[in-house]
Amino acid sequence: MADPSSYRPRPGEIPDSPGVYRFRDEHRRVIYVGKAKSLRQRLANYFQDLAGLHPRTRSMVTTAASVEWTVVSTEVEALQLEYSWIKEYDPRFNVKYRDDKSYPYLAVTMNEEYPRVQVMRGHKKKGVRYFGPYAHAWAIRDTVDLMLRVFPVRTCSAGVLKNAARTGRPCLLGYIGKCSAPCVERISAEDHRELAEEFCDFMAGRTGTYLRRLERQMAEAAEEMEYERAARLRDDIGALKKAMEKNAVVLADATDADLIAVAEDELEAAVQIFHVRGGRVRGQRGWVTDKVEEITTGALVEHALQQLYGEETGDAVPREVLVPALPDPVEPVQEWLTGRRGANVSLRVPQRGDKKALMETVQRNAQQALVLHKTKRASDLTTRSRALEEISDALGLDSAPLRIECYDISHLQGDDVVASMVVFEDGLARKSEYRRFQIKGFAGQDDVRSMHEVITRRFRRYLAEKERTGEWADGEEPGAAETAPDGTVAGTDGAGLAEPPANTLTEDDGRPKRFAYPPQLVVVDGGAPQVAAAQRALDELGIDDIAVCGLAKRLEEVWLPGDDDPVVLPRTSEGLYLLQRIRDEAHRFAITYQRAKRAKRFRSSPLDDVPGLGDTRKQALIKHFGSLKRLRSATIEQICDVPGIGRKTAETIVAALAQAVPGGPAVNTATGEIMDDTEEPGRQPGSPGEPVSTGAPDERRGQER
């Protein structure tokens, strides 16, 4: 490990000018390339105290052995040079998106004597018009098959073309009218090229001209009673419209734009790009990258723009590029894009309307791509085995933790405090073993105390199961178990998943076993305080054969009980990825339960406490009186007037409403306006199905959240 001070430039050596810098390792390999508006200010950031650097930046500067720079005149030149050097040196610490060479394009070879329509992959060639990329090659072939009726451009290979010219006989497509057969001179080279250009114009979005022309020709043929020709033109129009329907209109103003969305976590980022031409989505592509440096969303967008347009010119760069966050600074990037296009390019974040709605769709695709990438990665048996071995080595375990349990606490400003327990066996989620807890030992917000309570309750139940089945070793003392009459842990909601699988081991009375199996590793969502609380709970129960660790979200550090410093797993570690995935699943499960409880509380009504009063009679009461406030002021005789309500039930209702505390005011969920329920009959606080507020702020969670 190198000391950055050993190669730090002397004061005054670094120019205060725009430029591009390169860090090299001891073998003179370039490991990082960056650009700066001021080289002096930027490079000074790398040579500060190592403790103040981000862990990934610290890893880069300690791996490097030297730094060098090149001065340029403008920030745009710096952007261009940075892109060139990243392509040339492939530095290990730069963000590099996975190449998109596997994406198929619809290509028209305008550089040949007889232009050809075909599917192309790989690097783009000069003189070839490209459309796409498409998700699948069959989608291109379906589109081309429809359009060859109207634009019978050559699609055959060079060998087939040469053989047809030699024999004087066209291929099958020439006989069925889907090729103009330039090979046998049915059409001149000039006319065939013009046909290919019309094909390109249509694919580029200029569709209205050709449709109107065909409709005019069809009408003329019908007037001249050339009905067969009119029928062919009708079928051609139908084929073109069918091809257009494959790409629905998403922007009504026939906009040419590219939309870029980014989904990211601490270790990886997924980028999705939608290519919109003529208001229609003409292509889509996506990349996934490892975040090997400390980087913002705007910087991820800048790297995506470099890879997307670094080799493009002219119309391949659209007039408008919509992004989720702007690079900082944005002016050089916008000027660089304008230079690539040769005309002004607008780079901005959509704020409203159709473009913002479409950006949300692209964002959902990016999120799905990231989830799919993680799912594929997790499904590999070899990868899972390596991840468990890495966790075992990092935590000093005797064997790989085949069963891992993870716990998370969730609440809303101290209300509706709940916890989740998720289980992973052999690196895969075991959802039938998931459990949920309500925190009832105390009120308020205290994640550490909540974690102690949950771990205590879970493992008291485990000890009770171990004692009941006679699995105690000689000399062991079981801990006292706090169980409810139904066999669940006291204070829980009494359920894991609603439908346990049929093959789950059962109790003697036929119920599924709960908390019967111990994990080899307990993971808590949090840092040192949460880990200490979990370990203290296990120590109090006399359990010493279960390992405990915590995963802190800020820097993805792994904390062990009693250690002052965390364990930092390598960024590329499969073990870290598995721990992160388990932690995220526990967080999702806890948040889902907490939101469900909050929604149920908002929908509660004093009428819920009346025995034997179902939803139908509740609705009848509210409909009859108009609001809960008026029902409170009603007499027993007036309540008895409601169909289905007897005197005894009416007395119970009056008693329940007298004991209940009146709820807050009703709120218009569309505007947030507080309303008097006497002004709007049927809308009252606490009525069944009506929340008393428009929602709640985001969950404010524990110390490491």
Image (cartoon, rainbow, N blue to C red):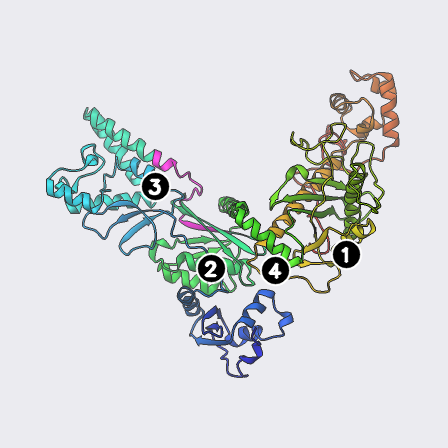
Tag 2's secondary structure?
loop
Q: Which of marks 1 and 2 is in front?
A: 1
Q: Do the residues labelled 3 and 2 touch (CB within 8 Å)?
A: no
Q: Which residue shows up at 27% across the image and 43% down it?
A: 199
Quadrant of the frame with the C terminus: bottom right
User: x%, y% of residue 245?
Assistant: 38, 35
Q: What element carries label 1?
A: helix
CB-based contact (under 8 Å), mark 4 and mark 3 = no
Task: Tell me which residue sits at (51%, 74%) in the image.
Answer: 38
Check the image and report above or below for 419 versus 570: above
Q: Is residue 685 above or below residue 588?
A: above
Question: What kind of residue is marked 2?
Answer: Lys
| Mark found first going from the N terminus, 4 or 2 | 2
- Residue 3: image location, x then y, percent: 58, 76
Sequence-first tag of 3 and 2: 2
Q: Which region shows up in magenta? A: 242-261
The residue singled out by tag 4 in the image is 569
